[in-house]
Image (cartoon, coloured by chain):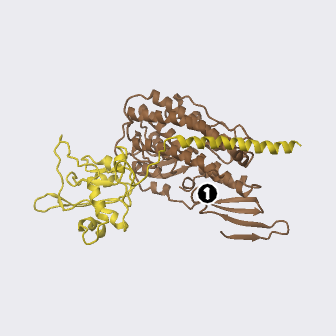
């Protein structure tokens, strides 16, 4: 008899507790939804909705880089390759290549912290799908040029965050013939 | 799935079943070899190593600051604690003082991370037992925490926030207010959770008196954290081996009391985690109220070369004691790094407690022991 009572008690408790749970679920019908309809129904571009410190794909401004290699020395996985050569006649240091392998990068931010000249930084871009993984090796040097020589006490002129990398990422899906050869040359010669 | 029927004499026929490595109810890539007799298990033998990434060997070829982002990958749900454990080891090895504000920020970020991790665990336990709604609700809350942490340090999962000597970024008042706003919202959710699922009779019946781990077994197998506390052992590193700012904080340590069955059953392991959510909220509130101004990182040179020696440092992570043993030979790179994680010991006890369990209960055991595959394999 006791067992039978316990059996029906359990059924009673099940119905009661389940309706408790369903009441909570039901109350959610009247709450504001928080879902964001990614990617095409956001109020503004998604990169603008990300917080200030968001660490996206790295970008490098050639006009600010002094070729000091502090960033590539700090990188734990060596995803930054820098090639600086000295011009024998003018004794100027020429920045030939600055390749960041985004496919390898782990977005730790150690290189950004190491750079004293604000040349390398995180953009807020994160959508970097490409058809070939080698295209993720991005060479940020368009034309080999002398390295920057910042004067002391002068603030560097920063370009808008993401403006540099966006150009390269847009380029990734362009037809091969139109694609600027600089973008990929770094990757191929590796 | 391969099946083998072993003939061990007339009465001892057993079916050997593979569960995993890819199975919807194992968290990550885990494999169990089940020896079953009908629906009842003789034993379940865990096989590990599918997610081995050689994190300990990698340490020998990176610098000390360069290894900190790798610690994010020890356990993808509690990156803050792994960062903190490794940083704490190097700090005590080379006598680096951590500023007080940094310690408060570590506690706030750590407890937020603990809530996020427990949200996943509680959600997964209920989902593995058939209730999908709570998982979605808790994942929504975790998403808010991820947003908060992203605003603080720039990444949602691999934070790389706690550094050797302090923390990487300062938090402004606006961020602290946002955290407080989230806590006000989340504490109501914890209350709601009790009604939604915790005392649901179906869930209670599935977990009460299942896979009881006695206090002796728990200590013997080296269980840590919520798994150990659920067995009635009152041990929390934050209180019993205090570090950082925790001695100044006031919080309770929930332990298993056999609320619906025996002490140390699956339900206790589940409910201890639910109770810990509230204590974490309490800790964060105290930290926000008392946080002082000041530096966020101590006096650390760019090249860290700890003196020769060895150190073991541990923190109370979401899965219990997350410890790291570092041997330094006086150079820029560690000589040896060894991780000690809660999931590994939780994994080792499964073979012991699985005897006589039903196959469906094994899912509850794995879920409530909170085994995370990457933490087991490193």
**Residue located at (44% from left, 29% from top):** B291
Q: Secondary structure at mark 1?
A: loop
**Residue located at (31% from left, 49% from top):** A112
Q: Seen from this angle, which residue lies furthest front?
A: A30
Residue A72: x and y in percent read 31, 55
Tell me the shade of chain B.
Answer: brown
Residue B161: x and y in percent read 42, 43
Along the horizontal axis of the image, is A134 left or right of B179? left
Quadrant where the image shows the N terminus of chain B: bottom right
Q: Seen from this angle, which residue lies furthest right?
A: A1
Q: Seen from this angle, which residue lies furthest left?
A: A89
Instruction: Work out whether residue B331 or residue A175 is closer to the camera in this orientation and state it.
Output: A175
Residue B314 seen from this side: no
Chain letter, disc 1 residue: B
Residue B139: x and y in percent read 53, 47
Along the horizontal axis of the image, is A51 left or right of B346? left
Residue B78: x and y in percent read 51, 46
- Relative to B6, residue B248 above or below: above
Instruction: Work out whether residue B303 or residue B281 is closer to the camera in this orientation and state it.
Output: B281
Instruction: Work out whether residue A63 or residue B67 is closer to the camera in this orientation and state it.
Output: A63
- Relative to A157, residue B46 above or below: below
Q: Which residue is mark 1?
A: B26
Instruction: Work out whether residue B26 or residue B329 is closer to the camera in this orientation and state it.
Output: B26
Which chain gets the yellow colouring?
A
- Relative to A142, residue A53 above or below: above
Residue A170 seen from this side: yes
Along the horizontal axis of the image, is B95 left or right of B200? left
Residue A76 falls in image quadrant: bottom left
- Total tally of numbered discs in the picture: 1
**Residue located at (51% from left, 52% from top):** B74
């Amino acid at each position: 008899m006791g067992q039978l009572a316990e059996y029906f008690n359990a059924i009673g408790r099940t119905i009661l507790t389940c309706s408790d749970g369903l009441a909570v679920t039901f109350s959610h019908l009247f709450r504001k939804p928080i879902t964001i309809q990614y990617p095409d129904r956001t109020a503004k571009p998604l990169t603008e909705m990300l917080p200030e410190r968001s660490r996206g794909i790295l970008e490098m401004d050639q006009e600010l880089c002094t070729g000091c290699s502090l960033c590539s020395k700090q990188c734990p996985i060596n995803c930054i390759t820098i090639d600086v050569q000295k011009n024998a006649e003018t004794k100027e240091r020429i920045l030939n290549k600055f390749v960041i392998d985004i496919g390898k990068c782990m977005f730790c931010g150690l290189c950004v912290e190491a750079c004293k000249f604000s040349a390398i930084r995180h953009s807020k871009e994160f959508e970097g799908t490409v058809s070939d993984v080698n295209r993720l090796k991005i060479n940020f040097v368009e034309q080999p040029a002398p390295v920057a020589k910042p004067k002391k006490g002068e603030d560097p002129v920063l370009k808008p965050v993401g403006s540099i990398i966006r150009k390269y990422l847009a380029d990734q899906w362009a037809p091969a013939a139109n694609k600027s050869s600089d973008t990929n040359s770094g990757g191929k010669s590796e | 799935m391969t099946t083998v029927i072993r003939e061990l004499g007339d009465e001892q026929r057993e079916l050997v079943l593979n569960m995993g490595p890819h199975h919807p109810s194992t968290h990550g890539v885990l494999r169990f070899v089940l020896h079953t007799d009908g629906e009842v298990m003789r034993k379940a033998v865990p096989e590990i190593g599918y997610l081995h990434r050689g994190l300990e060997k990698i340490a020998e070829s990176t610098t000390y600051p360069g290894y900190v982002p790798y610690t994010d990958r020890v356990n993808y749900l509690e990156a803050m604690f792994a960062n903190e454990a490794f940083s704490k080891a190097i700090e005590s090895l080379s006598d680096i003082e951590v500023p007080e504000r940094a310690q408060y920020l570590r506690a706030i970020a750590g407890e937020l991370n603990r809530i996020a991790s427990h949200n996943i665990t509680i959600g997964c336990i209920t989902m593995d037992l058939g209730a999908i709604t709570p998982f979605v609700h808790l994942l929504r809350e975790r998403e808010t925490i991820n947003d908060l942490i992203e605003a603080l340090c720039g990444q949602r999962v691999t934070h790389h926030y706690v550094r050797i000597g302090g923390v990487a970024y300062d938090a402004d008042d606006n961020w602290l207010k946002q955290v407080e706003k989230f806590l006000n919202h989340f504490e109501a959710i914890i209350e709601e959770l009790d009604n939604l699922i915790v005392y649901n009779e179906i869930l209670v019946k599935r977990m009460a008196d299942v896979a009881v781990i006695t206090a002796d077994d728990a200590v013997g197998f080296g269980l840590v954290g919520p798994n150990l506390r659920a067995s009635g052992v009152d041990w929390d590193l934050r209180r019993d081996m205090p570090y950082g700012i925790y001695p100044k904080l006031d919080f309770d340590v929930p332990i298993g009391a056999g609320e619906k069955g025996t002490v140390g059953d699956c339900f206790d392991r589940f409910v201890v985690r639910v109770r810990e959510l509230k204590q974490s909220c309490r800790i964060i509130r105290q930290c926000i109220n008392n946080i002082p101004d000041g530096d966020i990182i101590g006096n650390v040179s760019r090249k860290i070369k700890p003196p020769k020696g060895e150190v073991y440092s541990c923190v109370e992570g979401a899965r219990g004691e997350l410890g790291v043993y570092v041997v330094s030979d006086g150079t820029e790179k560690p000589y040896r790094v060894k991780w000690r994680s809660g999931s590994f010991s939780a994994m080792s006890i499964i073979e012991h407690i699985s005897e006589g369990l039903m196959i469906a209960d094994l899912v509850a055991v794995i879920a409530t022991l909170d085994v995370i595959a990457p933490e087991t394999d490193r």
